[in-house]
Amino acid sequence: MDLIGSYCASGFTVEAYFPESDAPDAWTIWVLKDGKVVKEFTTRIAVDSVHGMDQRVMGLLEAAAEAAIGEVMRKEAQSMEGFAAAA
């Protein structure tokens, strides 16, 4: 997998990877915390521009990355609520 880019937000690092040739619309997103992958997501985004990635694809990929962070944060919050209830 080839890394397209990464950024940090809300205490997480998000890495996005180009699709593999056998699945050209399947983009991989990793959400990392403390250098460890806590969740891997796959999002389907077709690249239909003859010039490759365009602004539309970048916007969709960014939205998918933000949604991935949101999902991980919700799961962490639920986990903390369960821990607090058990204490």
Image (cartoon, rainbow, N blue to C red):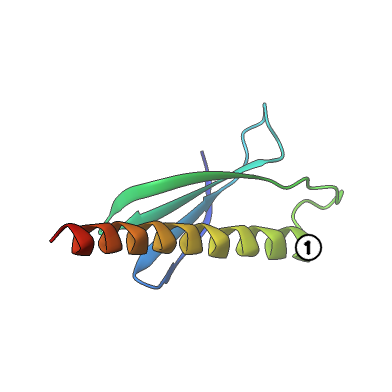
Q: Height in image: 17 above or below 56?
A: above
Q: Height in image: 72 above or below 7?
A: above
Please identify the residue farthest to the left as the structure is shown.
87
As helix, strand or loop, the secondary structure at mark 1 comes to: helix
**10 Å neighbourhood of mark 1: few (<14), some, or many (≥20)?**
few
Residue lying at 35% horizontally and 49% vertically, measured from the top left: 38
Q: Position of residue 12 (x, y in %)?
A: 37, 65
Q: Quadrant of residue 46?
A: top right
Q: Is residue 1 left or right of residue 10?
A: right
Q: Nearer the viewer, residue 84 or 53?
A: 84
Q: Please state, as top left, top right, bottom left or bottom right, where the C terminus lies in the image.
A: bottom left
Amino acid type assigned to the residue bearing label 1 in the image: Arg
Residue lying at 64% horizontally and 64% vertically, measured from the top left: 63
Q: Position of residue 21 (x, y in %)?
A: 67, 30
Residue lying at 29% horizontally and 63% vertically, measured from the top left: 81
Residue lying at 30% horizontally and 57% vertically, measured from the top left: 79
Q: Is residue 83 left or right of residue 77?
A: left
Please identify the residue farthest to the top as the structure is shown.
22
Q: Position of residue 5 (x, y in %)?
A: 52, 59
Q: Is residue 85 left or right of residue 44?
A: left
Q: Position of residue 49 (x, y in %)?
A: 85, 51
Q: Quadrant of residue 80?
A: bottom left
Q: Height in image: 30 above or below 26?
A: below
Q: Quadrant of residue 13?
A: bottom left
* Mark 1, residue position: 56
Count of numbered circles on the image: 1
